[in-house]
Amino acid sequence: MKRFLTGLQVAPRLGALALVLPLLAFVTLSFVVPLATLLGKSAYQPEVSQVFPDTMEALAGWDGEGLPPEAAFAAIAGELAQALEERSLPRVSGAINRVQSGMRGVLNRTARRLERTEFAGTWRDTLTGIHRDWQEPATWQAIRQAGARFTSRHYLQALDLERKEDGSIGLRPDESRVYTPLMWRTLLVSLGVTLLSLLIGYPIAYMIANSPPKRSRLLLLLVLVPFWTSLLVRTTAWIVLLQRQGVINGLLVSLGILPDDARLQMIYNMTGTFVAMTHVLLPFMVLPLYSVMRSIPSSHMPAAISLGASPLKAFRRVYLPQTMPGIGAGSLLVFILAIGYYITPALVGGRTGELISSQIAYHVQTSLNWGLAAALSSILLIAVTVLYLIYSRVIGVERMRLG
Amino acid sequence: MLNIFRPGASIPVRGFLGLILLAPAAAVSAESITVVSWGGSYARACEEAYHKAFTEETGIEVLLEDYNGGLAQIRAQVDAGAVHWDVVDLEMPDARLACDEGLIEVMDVADMPAGVNGEAPEDDYPAESVSECGAGMIFYSTVFAYNRKFLQGSPPESIADFFDLEKFPGRRGMRRSPLVNLEFALAADGVPLEEVYRVLDTPEGLSRAFRKLDTIKDQVVWWEAGAQPPQLLADGEVIMSTAYNGRIFNAQVLEDQPFVIVWDAQALDSGYLAIVAGTPRYEAARQFVLFANRPRSISNISKYISYGPVRVSARSLVDKHLETGTVMEPHMPTSPENLSRALELDWRWWSENRDEMYERFSAWLAR
Amino acid sequence: MRIMPGRRLGRYGFNAYCIAGFVFLLAPILVIVPLSFNAEPYFTFTEGMLRLDPEAWSLRWYNAILDDEAWSRALVNSLLIGVTATILATTLGTLAALGLASPSMPGRNLVTAVLISPMITPIIIVAVGVFFFYSSLGLAQTHAGLILAHAALGAPFVVITVTATLAGFDRTVMRAAASLGAGPLRRFFRIQLPLIAPGVFSGGLFAFAASFDEVVVVLFLGGLEQRTIPRQMWAGIREQISPAILALAVFLIAFAVLVLLTVEWLRNRSSSAQG
């Protein structure tokens, strides 16, 4: 410590760096490296080539037309038996199966029967005798593709693209597109939530900024209470309010506005996601708006009006332009947070209110397709990084304020 | 309350001290194992039925963790060589896959405890439930159920009714998984129960199942944890829901919920207690699994929830629900009457096709 | 004068609109409080509650929370992880902010971006990334793993708040002290630290709140032994929202108000300290 601070005097650059370095190292190790590893998983897939090294070597010279040489048949027979014994087979057959469905069965069955099958003179005949798919070039192409250490497959899948027979890249057929529609939905929901927050938040911020000091502080506290309240508490609150037997439906039924059997479906769908997310993110809109509005002299609007402008025109021409930095900051902040939201949509969104984050969680926890999860993550991360760059260019990170 | 240095400080506190003083991994004492199960009333039933007795007999503490199925956690732990879960209660298709992948330690059926009258264990399990990966422990079933409070009038009676939005308008609860749902869809579409997997094995049959699911897709609330469907039914959030039969039973007898189970096309599966490969507490875990597979332990489960033993000799021990005195037999998925309309889950088919089905299902769901 | 009624109407309309906005913000939180005293396991106001019948109100859900060992264990976990992560984040974050504030800091923008990055990265990506990486190091399902992840998530808050405090810090004071013969350590602890203390403290509070409310990383990285309050709540919401969750929510709302008032108090102090 002493050295750091003395350093401040002697060599200011080094001193400053030395102060920053511990956190920089910490964040790099505990955060940046894990993230980089995750992104690596999206393109790097060593499993198959580790378990089938000889097969991959034998396939290296194969032109992809017709069947590969006998050496490839011999290599895979040996390596299948070994993989079965070492129990690495299912993971590999799972990886190859993702390239071409049905391969899991081919590989597992072949490996199990190899031991009991008599050698038929060539490995090619032996394997084909066990499963006729070994005669198909497609089988070998799948193995070769899955065995490549580096792959663009996960990115193609994440963007709903596929490699056509002729090698060109094109869109998947309409009914098997999954992720691009979901990305659009995520984008639209984030935009919608941002817009809704702006519509609700702008007047609120205006009111706080233009009230007498005492009332202003009180109103600000009213925004800060939800800001500090646990996310899960707020999400629970919306479940309590919105569900079929919840407070709002109960109120409407007891007031006779709704018949008991026509309760509104406001949760486990897009409505739930929209309402709860807007509520959670609203303070992030109000606070930057407020801090900008506070610095605008309250005499500007009356001055413009006294010069003959209508209140609407005065607002549009005089006030609104001055609040643009606040609008920009709040909107970007809300948008960045919304685009990666997980908890709230997962709890109140149901199937139709689900965002891209749920698919990432799904592929990590359930489908075990980690490469795809990594590819989806990196696409999301790129989007957020671009937004962040805009944010720091337009608004400046140092102006980011909290609470 | 937060006296960290108190000798009897709770486990997390000890874990924290361990973290500061020693290596991060030494959080759990040697005399405890982590058992991962399905939460809610089922986990409580197992606790009462044999966890406590196990701790009493061996002194090994059982820490109970919840999950909703799947192999990702186990796979990550085994891959990293840092196993924290010792014993996991797996669905049969997952158990089979985990066994193939070497994620679990295989227990030979012959090593299991003897039957009630000293039967050799290999003779005490029905042949079709035994594989080289071991045998299932309890039978449970996925059924569909409704709440009489919200569904009056003529009740649904068949799986076709579950898919019939005209006769029974309203939302349905279904598990967020292709497992069982594909079978239900085909059965509702008129495929005889014994032919479901033959049809499902063809591309046309599979599309047919998804087309049938399409017809109710917009009306489905997807659940993940077994404790959710009773809650969805009680809240009237759905008009009917697929559910594990034991959860519905417990809500019926313990909470007096007017739930009704429809046994048509009940999907019968067995649960499997697996030891995670490479656990440093293998001996304790093995002791636990052997203890759990004693006829008395398994049959004890049926004192708390309507799940029954796979072992033949243990079935004679099934009697009454402990708290309410309800005779259990008619509520068991294996009672002759309920069994007459059962669809036996084909775990061989599922372990071969698991990945494709999950992928296709998630793609279908996301659209 | 004809314009006035319209304008007044406009003003009323505007006020009504704003009030509706405040209601939207606060009503959900306020509704939870009375419902947590419901004697029945429902989420609607029963007739008895509306009649203020004492029978319809009860503390049973509060007792349920206080009696359940799972919740007290979760609290211990939340506090252990939160406090340790906060100490780590605050120490490193304050030092870094001091460095960043120095006019001669090289590559300030890039370094700031890296240090702030945990805060703007979507939490799901953070969770998945640390899950894979920490698993391979044997840090999954340990308190240490969660503390490291939470400290990284909390550090940006400290950097930002301390940087903001330093922006109002008059460097001539330090120079004056130096000319009077005070050494650098002495200058730091006697002059700089007291002045930036409110910023450090409120940054630490932000870091603690971030950890105390964090659930996604815990979901992926934590195990049974690391169950925190939000993780326990997540399980409760997913499986069964009993009013016991609402009772806990009321505790957390009270906690939020307490934190909020502390931050406000600190801010007032720091602004008056800087004139």
Image: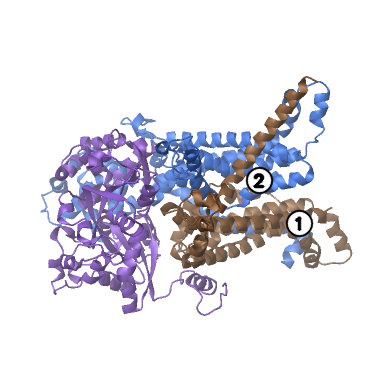
Chain colours: A blue, B purple, C brown
Q: Tags 2 and 1 in contact by the CB under 8 Å rule? A: no
Residue in the image at 50% along x and 49% along y: C47
Residue in the image at 23% along x and 44% along y: B183
Query: Dot 2, crowdedness within 10 Å: few (<14), some or many (≥20)?
Result: many
Element on which disc 2 rests = helix
Circle 2 sits on which residue? A223
Q: Position of residue A144 (x, y in %)?
A: 30, 43
Q: Earlier in the sequence, mark 2 or mark 1?
A: 1
**Of A121 and A309, which appears nearest the observer?**
A309
Residue C103, placed above or below residue B273: above
The quarter holding residue A277 reads: top right
Circle 1 sits on which residue? A12
Asked whether the viewer can see residue A143, the reply is no
In the rendered image, the quadrant that contains the C terminus of chain B is top left
Marks 2 and 1: which is nearer the front?
2
Drawn side of residue A282 relative to residue B16, left or right: right
Labels 2 and 1 share a subunit: yes
